[in-house]
Amino acid sequence: MTTKRVASTLVLSIVMIGGPSLALSQSGDMKGMDMGHEIVIPKGALYTKADVEFMQGMIAHHSQAIVMSRMAESHGANPQVLKLSNKIDQSQVPEIRIMQAWLRRNKQFAPDTSSWHDVMMAGMLTAAQLKELDSGKGVDFDRAYLRLMIQHHAGALKMVDDLFNAPLAGQEVDVNVFANDVVTAQTIEIGIMQKLLTELPAK
């Protein structure tokens, strides 16, 4: 099974589990990203506009995940959720640097980590959802964090799927490797989060 099909199947299953609200949150795509910089692809380049948009958008996407994860300690997350949130934080920071370096190397605009404030893509939390997460303490935070981060990760998988569905996109080696790494890591983390949700005390 190809990465594209794996991502599509997993996103669909998560949306079905999550219900209507999650399905609505997944309706966004790369069209929700506008960094305010024109993308010009040089003649003969091995990458496409969709590749650039993917890397720019994933920087914003990762940045919001880091903001969410850094709430865990101050909001009384349990040890398992705190361990996972730290792992997401520590893995996505260097990935942002990799994406920024790729964009600069190809003379494209490289957004910084504040870019998540200005765009809305698949899986990203709304202002209301961020407020909900921030208001949670203890097990209420754990439950909200896991549910919303599953949504967030599912959005990242949709972004990869959109990338591979765009004509000629996802073929440049660094973009291809990175996109596949996103699918591998975030698919595993979704499984961990689904399991942790089942282990939380009932409301």
Image (cartoon, grey):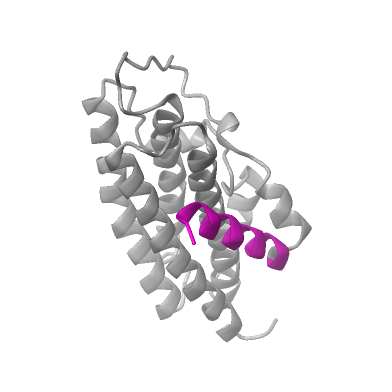
Image coordinates of residue 173 in percent, x first then y, are 28, 41
Residue 155: x, y in percent? 56, 50
Whole-percent x, y for residue 68 in the image? 47, 55
**95 to the left or right of 40:** left
The stretch drawn in magenta includes residue 15: yes
Where 2 falls versus 126 (above or below)? Answer: below
Residue 174 placed where, x, y %? 28, 41
Side of 114 where 193 appears, left or right: right
Q: Is residue 200 magenta?
A: no
Q: Is residue 176 visible?
A: yes
Instruction: Say which residue appears at 36% left-offset and 38% top-offset.
Output: 171
- Image quarter of residue 55: top left
Q: Mark yes or no: residue 135 visible.
A: no
Which span of residues is magenta-colored?
1-17
* Residue, far right: 20
Question: Quarter holding the C terminus?
Answer: bottom right
Query: Closest to the observer: 198 or 107?
Result: 107
Residue at point 43% right, 57% down?
183
Give me the residue at 36% from left, 73% from top: 83
